[in-house]
């Protein structure tokens, strides 16, 4: 299997994860996440872009659900595509209604909670290898 295609099992068709040109119907992708079995756990995610130094993960999350604390070696951004989420980082609570964006530096621990049924894009950029 090519590095640019990820097998997501029977529930998902093979989709390109890298290439010179990628296009997404985010609303359609969110609807797919909400109709998959994993949605019943409170949230469902899929990697939609995967390069060695950059990733994009789309997550649909149910109202009242939480994603526990994470941190990464690279910088991240969290953009609410639908609904309203809250992020907690560095002792702060940041409200992220639809179309809001939060950027965090490397190694900053954060968690996410859904104020209402929501979806967000997590974008991760890793430092250049030296």
Image: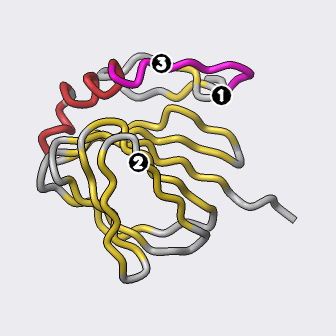
* Residue beneath disc 3: 14
Of residues 26 and 51, which is closer to you in this image?
A: 26
Q: Residue at x 42, y 67 (%)?
A: 70
Of residues 60 and 2, which is closer to you in this image?
A: 60
- Residue 71, compared with residue 60, is above or below; it is below
Residue 93 position within the rendered picture, expressed as x and y whole percent measured from the top left: 31, 72
Dot in front, 3 or 1: 1
Q: Earlier in the sequence, mark 2 or mark 3?
A: 3
Q: What element does badge 3 sit on? A: loop
Q: Quadrant of residue 10?
A: top left
* Residue beneath disc 1: 18
Display colour scheme: secondary structure
Badge 3: residue crowd in 10 Å (few <14, some 14–19, many ≥20)? few
Q: Is residue 93 magenta?
A: no
Residue 45 position within the rendered picture, expressed as x and y whole percent measured from the top left: 35, 40
Q: Residue at x 25, y 48 (%)?
A: 84
The magenta-colored residue range is 19-27
In the image: residue 65, left or right of residue 128: left
* Residue beneath disc 2: 100
- Residue 19, compared with residue 107, is above or below; it is above
Q: Residue at x 29, y 36 (%)?
A: 82
Q: Quadrant of the C terminus?
A: bottom right
Whether pointer 2 and pointer 1 mark residues with C-beta atoms closer than 8 Å, the reply is no
């Amino acid at each position: 299997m090519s590095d640019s295609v990820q097998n997501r099992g029977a529930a998902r068709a093979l989709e390109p994860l890298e290439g010179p040109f990628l296009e997404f119907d985010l609303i359609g992708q969110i609807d797919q996440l909400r109709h998959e079995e994993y949605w019943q756990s409170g949230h469902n995610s899929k990697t939609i872009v995967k390069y060695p130094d950059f990733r994009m993960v789309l997550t649909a999350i149910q109202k009242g659900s939480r994603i526990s604390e994470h941190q990464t070696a690279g910088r991240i951004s969290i953009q609410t595509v639908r609904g309203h989420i809250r992020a907690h980082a560095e002792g702060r609570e940041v409200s992220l209604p639809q179309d809001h964006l939060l950027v965090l530096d490397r190694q900053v621990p954060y968690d996410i909670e859904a104020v209402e049924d929501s979806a967000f894009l997590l974008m991760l950029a890793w430092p250049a290898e030296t």
